[in-house]
Amino acid sequence: MAEQKEVKYYTLEEIKQHNHSKSTWILLHNKVYDVTKFLEEHPGGEEVLREQAGGDATETFEDIGHSTDARNMSKEFVIGELHPDDLSKIQKPSETFITTTDSDSSWWSNWIIPGISAMIVALMYRFYMVSE
């Protein structure tokens, strides 16, 4: 029968204290990783991990698009999980909506100006072809 390992929980405050080269912890998907021994081996360089040290690196990790091999390798550095009381303190990435404050300005720049430019180019082309 498989032995069930007890999960060690860490608070955000504990994780924040491990932000130097002698002890580098990061948080990925609410799991705590001690990547101190991996600093020199990281393909992206030590600085990449050091910039994220002591904090939540989930968004950066996912933005890079790590391979399946990298994800499997990362499992050996898991030392615990974020304490359930701190789960609500993690900032979830907010969706950004691009809006314009002046819809008339958007209409002009998106339709009228390119339309007029296209007409001018067409007239210039026609004039050039007729003059030959």
Image (spheres, rainbow, N blue to C red):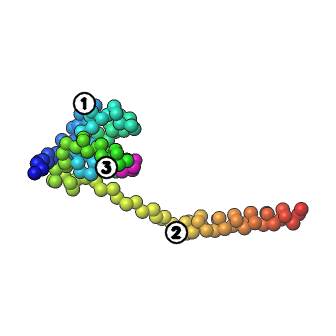
Instruction: Give me the C-alpha separation between circle 3 and circle 2.
Output: 36 Å
The residue wearing badge 1 is 22
Which amino acid type is marked by label 2?
Answer: Ser
Q: Earlier in the sequence, mark 1 or mark 2?
A: 1
Q: Main secondary structure of the magenta part?
A: helix
| Residue at screen point 24% across, 33% down | 23
Tag on residue 35? Answer: none
Looking at the image, residue 128 sits to the left or right of residue 22; the answer is right
Q: Is residue 90 left or right of residue 116?
A: left
Q: Secondary structure at mark 3?
A: helix
Q: For mark 2, give the secondary structure.
A: helix
Q: Residues within 10 Å of mark 2 (few under 14, many from 20)?
A: few
Q: Residue at the far right: name it.
A: 132
Q: Which portion, as a residue range, is magenta?
A: 60-65
Numbered disc 1: secondary structure: loop
Identify the residue at horizontal 24%, vertical 41% (top origin). 76
The residue tagged 2 is 103
Disc nearest the viewer among 1 and 2? 1
Q: Nearer the viewer, residue 110 or 40?
A: 40
Q: Is residue 21 left or right of residue 3?
A: right
- In the rendering, which numbered label is found on residue 58? 3
Mark yes or no: residue 43 visible. yes
* Three-letter code, disc 3: Thr
Label 3 vs label 1: CA separation? 22 Å
Separation (CA) of disc 1 from disc 2:
54 Å
114 vs 108, nearest the viewer: 114
| Tag in front: 3 or 2 | 3
